[in-house]
Image (cartoon, rainbow, N blue to C red):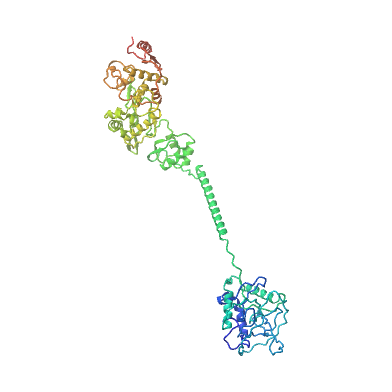
Amino acid sequence: MRDGESDDPSTESGGEPAVTDERRRTRHRDQGRRAEGMDPERLRYFTQPAEGTPHTRHRRRRSAQAPGTTGPIPGLTPATPPGQRATPVRIPPGGQIPQQPRTRPVPPAADGQTEARTTPRASRPAEPQPPQPAEPHASRPAERQSPPRRPVPPREDRPVAEAETDTDFIVERRPAPAPDRRVDDPRDADDFRDADDFRDVEVPEPSSAQPRRLRAARADTEVRALHDPGEDDGWWPGVDDVEEPAAPRRPRRRSREKQKQRRAVVAVAVVFMLALVGGIGYFGLKTLGVFDSRKDYTNAAGTSDVIVDIPDNSTLADFGRILVDADVVGSVRAFVEAADGRPISGGIYKLRTQIPASTAVEMLTDESATHRVGRVVVPPGLQLDSKTGIDGKVTPGIFQRIQDATTVDVNGRSEGVTVTQLEEAAANSTPEELGVPSWAKEAVESMTGDHRRIEGLIAPATWERVEPQDSPVQILHDMIAKSATMFESWGLLDKNNSGLQPYETLVAASIVEREVRHEEDAPKVARVIRNRLDRDQKLEMDSTQNYTADVTNIDVHGDAYKADTEWNTYRYKGLPPTPIASVGMPALEAMLDPAPGRWLYFVTVDTAGTTRFADTFEEHKRNREEACDNKLVSTGCQ
């Protein structure tokens, strides 16, 4: 059922229902809601206006006549005579509908029928309509005439459909060509033609977001412009006069996404920069000690013993942190201020807990190294065993020094290794356990059971970190393995021009180490050794005889020449079975590349260490007499 049609018998003679006051109020009140909720059957009567026509939307009512003709739909006789246009009534704010006539009386025509008022435009003849029985209507309010309308100039370019009268408003529409088909019911034909016309038209739903008052105002303006742009005839919008909203604009999603991405990137960058600047500032201030505590202890005696290991090349701040962790000092800042830039060597120290920072600095910088633990100094020419000189002075050997460095009492508990333990490990441990290099492995293994088999394999150096908790085997392993690396770095394997094997070169270099007092004499002594070996002549070196002697003496005499040991070169030809002392780099380099010469003899002639070299034995005797005159030797002197 469409607007203007009713099953109520109280209709006007033309078939239109009576427009009562209640019906007008209902339409005015529901115009926005009904427009927004209009069903699809009604929406199909709306379309865009043709190009060049006024921009308005209205319902299209087609005639079931022949193509090209216009006229009323059979069975739907308009309530207003054809020559009279209905005037829309505007509802005032009070809600009372003004009483006005629905039609204007027109003088009867000659044929007794009312003449339809039309525009000057050309119109097509209407087809005969079947009569529709008039039905009585309810009483209607008094009608009043509308003022005459100004004629619209005719348009000659195209035919215009005859004005169509509706109960709400009057619009003029250009009819579309009717399809060429036969139908029985004119009303059905109208419906089918409308369906065909609007089959391809896409009608969007009216925008519910648009205010109802704005939509009504636009519809009012557009319909009045269609009738008479300059006249305000009190028209008010009907239920079907809903403006079709413009097509919604697509949001620029890609642009918005890019903006969001850029904002996210900027936010991340800002957060990163703030974190970076904050982190740099924090660590910078921390490095400067701004956040450090100034806590310091006051008891110089402390509370207990503790062993602290400080790596080499540590800064004063590193010292402070390690000491704080060991509870030796109260704070890093207190220690750094107490040290006042003084250099401190890394190593293992025996300290006391909870002592003042100044006391800790004194213990770490003590010249006597009383508080140092595990620091072993091996000078060049030192032997494994301790030796007593002709003057009765005892020279501690390497094993004794290791014992002294590792033996420490920590809160009543003794730590460290002994000489006996070291000798046992050196004599009976395998070369692999002792860290012996491959080039000395055969010689060491052949002397298993004798601790002197590792003689000369420990290089002269200051061993800063010999752990008291380590076993004797572990201590010897670490020292021998590191010494082998040192020897090889000095050229024992790749710069050897002595004509000897690496281990033999080390043995010969140990003799040079013990015989020479001045470094510049080392290459000549090395040449003497090399010349005697080439001639298969006994070396007859005092240093080799003193290696096994109970008392070392530069003036070898008596039974010392006759001692039956493999290290006595006065008795046996060739090199001794092992080195006779630790070998320093100058002595090793001298043996790797001996000085050119034919020397077979040398002797020290004074206490200053002056050495004379000779090619013949006669020359050597004269040099020896000089030593006798200087009271350096007495054996063989006249």
Q: Is residue 330 left or right of residue 22?
A: left
Residue 518: give x, y in percent of width and height: 41, 20
Q: Is residue 573 above or below residue 622?
A: below
Question: Residue 116 versus residue 329: which sits nearer the camera?
Answer: 116
Question: Residue 10 versus residue 561: which sits nearer the camera?
Answer: 10
The residue lying furthest to the top in this view is 638
What is the quadrant of residue 490 in the picture? Answer: top left
Residue 225: give x, y in percent of width and height: 69, 74
Residue 530: give x, y in percent of width and height: 36, 19
Q: Is residue 125 above or below residue 316?
A: below
What is the quadrant of residue 470 in the picture? Answer: top left
Q: In percent of the image, x 58 and y 87: which residue is there?
A: 8
The answer to whether residue 374 is seen in the rendering is: yes
Q: Is residue 267 above or below residue 444?
A: below
Residue 231: give x, y in percent of width and height: 72, 77
What is the quadrant of residue 583 in the picture? Answer: top left
The answer to whether residue 39 is seen in the rendering is: no
**Quadrant showing the N terminus:** bottom right
Q: Is residue 283 left or right of residue 499?
A: right
**Quadrant showing the C terminus:** top left
